[in-house]
Image (cartoon, rainbow, N blue to C red):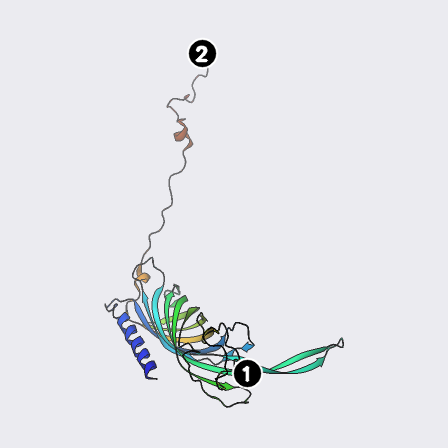
Amino acid sequence: MKRANKIVTCAVVALIAIMGFSTRASAQHTLTLTGGTGVATARFYPEEITKWMWGSETFGLSWRYYSEKPRFVGAVGIDLEYMERGFNFGYAYSSDFVEQADGEMKEVRTYYYYNRKINTLMLPLVWQPHFYLARNRLRIFIEAAVVLSYNISSHYEYLDDRYPAGKYEWKVPRDNRFGYGLSGGLGFAVLIHQVEIGLKAKYNFGYSDIMKNRNKYYSNSTDGRENPFYYTPLRSPLDNINVMFTVGWRFNKRGFDEWFVVRKKREKKLDSFNFSAQTGANTGSGGRQAGGNPNQGRR
């Protein structure tokens, strides 16, 4: 736990240090509190029976910096989030055979699920393109991010109450504390003076594995009930879908510089193609004059 506290402290200090680069009165940055809920799961390979884990809570702090260059659209920033991740794994099943209308018997399986919740510290590095509506009172945006993560702690339970729940004990040969992935999302924010109130949805797509593959940790023969996998999966990345409310503060009272950029209107091209000028057929310059005698000069 002390190690986790040190990581959280370092992340907060890094966030404050980055904000320090924009300390001018006209600095183009915002600080936002986020919080919400969603669903979580894992993508196992070889494929296993899983279902979404509902009620995955998340909350955090977001910093965004908006470029002063008028032709740059959007913001860059960094987030510091606490997120509940995890999965429901069908570790066993019972079978019933039901007679169909054609007389054939069909197997119907009832699965028993193992649930694991993982408390994770997330650090997304974000790019956020956006545009404004309603006279700069409504901001619509999308997000793309590279995400680094650290798994603080974990708990497990069997949803059928076959076995007691407990704390998941991390093993260096079996479990990965650090992870990485990508995320993307979209949302909107309503601007009220210097306050931004909004809503966004985000999908975190994991690339790293929560459990090390079989080359490093093969079976659960020496494990307790915390590990229901007889053979360790080859791949086990985690995914989350979350909906979050946001409340932000804009440090610039005047507003963002891009609001006040007056773009030059495109001038219409006034020149048109002049056939006579291009062909040398102008009246009175080398050609026949209007009203002249067509037979003049003939013998």
Residue furthest to the top in view is 299
Q: Which mark is residue 298?
A: 2
Residue 142, placed above or below residue 38: above
Q: Which of 55 and 288 is in front in this view?
A: 55
Residue 262 screen position, x and y as percent: 32, 56
Could you say where residue 65 lies in the image, as x and y percent from the top left? Answer: 31, 67
- Could you say which is closer to the camera, residue 54 or residue 212? 212
Asked if one can make out residue 33 in the rendered structure from this viewpoint, the answer is no
Q: Can you name the residue that lies furthest to the right here?
A: 103
Residue at position x 30%, y 68% in the image: 29
Measuring from the top left, give residue 125's x and y in whole percent. Answer: 36, 68
In the picture, the disc for residue 113 is 1
Spatial distance from mark 1 to mark 2, Cα to Cα? 110 Å
Query: Callout 2: few (<14), some (14-19), or many (20+) C-alpha neighbours within 10 Å?
Result: few
Tell me where residue 80 sits by quadrant. bottom left
Element type at marker 2?
loop
Image check: 158 left or right of 6?
A: right
Above-or-below relation of 63 to 275: below
Mark 2 or mark 1, which is nearer the start of the sequence?
A: 1
Do we see residue 17 in this rendering? yes
Question: Does the residue at mark 1 contact the one at mark 2 (Cβ under 8 Å)?
Answer: no
The quadrant in which residue 192 appears is: bottom left
Q: Which amino acid lies under the numbered mark 1 shown in the image of this protein?
A: Tyr
> Toward which corner of the image does residue 185 lie, by quadrant?
bottom left
Q: Which of marks 1 and 2 is in front?
A: 1
Looking at the picture, which amino acid does disc 2 mark?
Answer: Arg
At 28% from the left edge and 75% from the top edge, which residue is drawn? 13
Task: Determine whether the residue tagged by mark 1 lies in a helix, strand or loop.
Answer: strand
Which quadrant of the figure contains the N terminus?
bottom left
Please state the horizontal and vertical placement of residue 35, each as a whole percent of the image. Answer: 40, 78
Q: In this view, does 270 lie above or below 143?
A: above
